[in-house]
Amino acid sequence: MEKVILNGESLTLEDVVNVARHGAQVEIAEDRKELVKANRAIVDGIVEEERVVYGVTTGFGSLAKVSISKEQSAQLQENLIRTHSSGYGNPLKEDEVKAVMLIRINSLVKGVSGIRYETIETILAMLNKGVVPYIPEKGSLGASGDLAPLAHMVLPMLGLGRAYYNGELMSGKEAMDKAGIEIIELSAKEGLALINGTTVLTAIGALATHDAIELLKLSDIAGALSLEAHRGIIDAFYEKLHTIRPHKGCLATAKNIRELTEGSTYLTHTADIRVQDAYTLRCIPQIHGANKDSIAYVKEKVEIEINAATDNPIIISDTEVISGGNFHGEPMAQPFDFLGIGASEIGNVSERRIERLVNAQLSDFPSFLVANPGVNSGFMITQYAAAALASENKILAHPASVDSIPSCENQEDFVSMGTIAARKARDIVANSRRIVATEIMAAVQAIDFRKDEGLKLGVGTQAAYDLVRSTVDFISEDKDIEIYDELEKMTKILVDESLVEAVEAKVGLDIQ
């Protein structure tokens, strides 16, 4: 895998995934070093002259009115980390923390944060050598950025806190020692440069956005399999129908379904068997397509934010030190709420297609997709579980960004709650992926009930069917299986992206 080179300008969502999940190594572009050093020299001059600059020669937040001497400026930064690391809850996952570190480095090498280059190199060494700080997932208001979780990221750099090394949790000092990385002492402005920004909410949301894009592809695969299982009507997916209402997501979805099912003899035309299909089948382009458009918007916002400088103050020149609001999470809080809504809708429609597959009153399959229903329950409770996840998603999809609780003696009087929005979106995507996994497993089970009809699947759906059946067997009798284990195997090939890869080896899957 090629190294990811950071210059503060060109980081992509794919780069974030490659570093956070696939272990790609990271370098800083050579031309950034002198830029960062020149910017740092401005901070040194401010301290020496004892000029009044927020967070450098003053306290933080509402304590900006308190002057800090040059003798106290370094201690101020360490104090900041020790007291701001007040998070709570389960730790962020390893891939999320790696994404946090990557995005923070990329922000700092823009050369407007006043940090020493050597301090950036310490984070880089931690990322490349596998020192993963222990960061509790709760405690950020999303303005002034992600103060509490980012402070936890910094602790091991100072020989404090906790971190994982080779998957083992230990003290931050021990992890740094084992990796051969020297701990540091912070200098003026550096604590603030490290923790004031939207990095944690952006990292969580960026990975959730990638997973949502994969979910969109999976939902089209699931919809196509369900359509074929029901001998659905292909006419509703004709391009000429969608060009007269040309939303990009609708056009892409209709095209995906046509290509997935190309060559299928399962599909029918209007009035062959029925006049029209139910909405969850007939309106797949409109429903899935709307969510494609939503998530494409979120991806665009993510790729702006991962290349942004989001701390405060911004050091532009010796005469331009601007105390602004780039740390405020609102530009990402709303998109991540939108991401959660889009992913929730994918789960909602998939659960309804599961019900249509398992309900003998809505199909020509046996009840709960199993022979001899009664002694066998088959897929009965898979729909219950999917319904529970869909209902949970509806609660989680309530937007976080509409809330605000003032903080810091009312100096920070309107906050974004963007990190909560990102965490909710992540959880919704995972729930919806499990629902879609259930639908695919049920649809393949239903298709097997038609084996004697001599029908042929489409080129893309056949690839999906083959991989599923190489992983999960047809369920003949309840006594032969433990359904949780089968669902876990099914979910794994969605999570590791092997199902999408198998299908995309045969047909392209467009998102826009």
Image: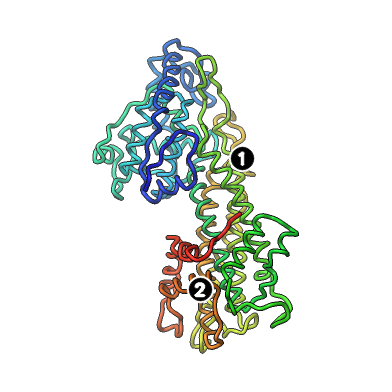
Q: Which label's residue is closer to the chain start, 1 or 2?
A: 1
The foreground one among 206 and 15 is 15
- Label 1 CA crowd tier, 10 Å (few <14, some 14–19, many 20+): some
* Residue under the image location 52 percent in, 34 percent down: 308
* Residue under the image location 56 percent in, 29 percent down: 409
Could you say which quadrant of the image residue 360 lies in? Answer: bottom right
Question: Is residue 91 something that shows in the picture?
Answer: no
The x and y percentages for residue 129 are: 30, 42
What residue type is disc 1 on? Ser
Q: Residue furthest top?
A: 49
The x and y percentages for residue 218 are: 53, 63
What residue type is disc 2 on? Gln
Q: Which mark is residue 497?
A: none
The x and y percentages for residue 185 are: 33, 26
Q: Are marks 1 and 2 in contact (CB under 8 Å)?
A: no
- Label 2 CA crowd tier, 10 Å (few <14, some 14–19, many 20+): many
Q: Which residue is mark 1?
A: 404
The foreground one among 182 and 217 is 217
Q: Secondary structure at mark 1?
A: loop
Could you say which quadrant of the image residue 470 lies in? Answer: bottom left
Q: CA distance from mark 1 to mark 2?
A: 49 Å
The x and y percentages for residue 435 are: 53, 66
The foreground one among 135 and 507 is 507
Relative to 166, say whether 102 is above or below. Answer: above
Number of dots carrying numbers: 2
Question: Is residue 151 something that shows in the picture?
Answer: yes
Q: Which residue is mark 2?
A: 462
